[in-house]
Amino acid sequence: AALDLPAGLGRAVSGPVDDLGALFPEERAAVARAVPSRQAEFAGGRQAARRAMAALGLPPCAVPVGADRSPRWPEGVVGSITHDGGLCIAIVGRSEAWQAIGIDFERDAELSPEIAAEIATATELSTLAPLSRGRAAARVFSAKEAAYKAQYPLTGCLFGFDAMAAHLPDGGMRMCADTGLGRGAALPMQQHLVAGRVLSLCLMPRPAVLG
């Protein structure tokens, strides 16, 4: 509730939802074979998504999944959903104002040196000093997850952690490979610490049209 989000964004939080009757038929079909914990998490995410859309004055709509398992938002809506620690979070905006949205929610915990080396370069980690390398890697991981989720609906591109370079103290994330949005493309990033977790937001407004 304390997040200072730009105008024109709807946000909501839900816990897991055990009643799959709260889902639209096409949503239920997507998790029909999932374990109960995954079903509850999915249903909580969709409940948060509908609450976030309602905050923008939008009617309740299904948010099914595509063949790639990513959310399929209603026409005119962009958004992102994340789950962790018993919380399901959604942020949405109207596509006329927002080009892309990506969010991620992770434990703010130490990652092993082996995992840290796969996620970030020594330069990326050093920008977050005096945080330990393991804790810095967790924050870079969350930021890159949010940035990836933002770009994917636009490009459909799959790539690894080394395709992006983070400079989180400045809210910076840039593509450093010829993939996705293209080398040098900026992916604005902000992070918030919430109850021992890090919430990463990649919010990309649509460029203003000059008349």
Image (cartoon, grey):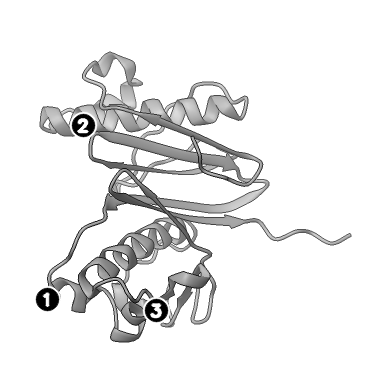
Amino acid carrying mark 3 in the image: Thr
Measure the C-alpha gap from mark 2 to mark 3: 40 Å
Which residue in the structure is indicated by mark 1? Answer: 114
Sequence-first tag of 3 and 1: 1
Residue placed at 84% from the left, 62% from the top?
210
Classify residue 97 as left or right of residue 68. Answer: right
Quick check: 66 left or right of 111?
Answer: right
The residue where tag 3 is placed is 127
Question: Along the line of sight, which residue is nearer the eye, 113 or 10?
Answer: 113
Q: Quadrant of residue 35?
A: top left
Q: Residue at x 42, y 76 (%)?
A: 179
Mark 2, residue position: 31
Q: Amino acid at mark 2?
A: Val
Instruction: Give the quarter of the figure containing the C terminus.
Output: bottom right
Q: Are marks 3 and 1 in contact (CB under 8 Å)?
A: no
Residue 168, how many percent across, how many down? 44, 70
Query: Residue 132's x, y, as percent?
Result: 24, 72
* Residue at x-position 34% and y-position 47%: 70
Residue type, label 1: Glu
Q: Element type at marker 1? A: helix
User: Which badge, 2 or 1, comes first in the chain's sequence?
Assistant: 2
Judge depth for marks 2 and 1 and give the one in front: 1
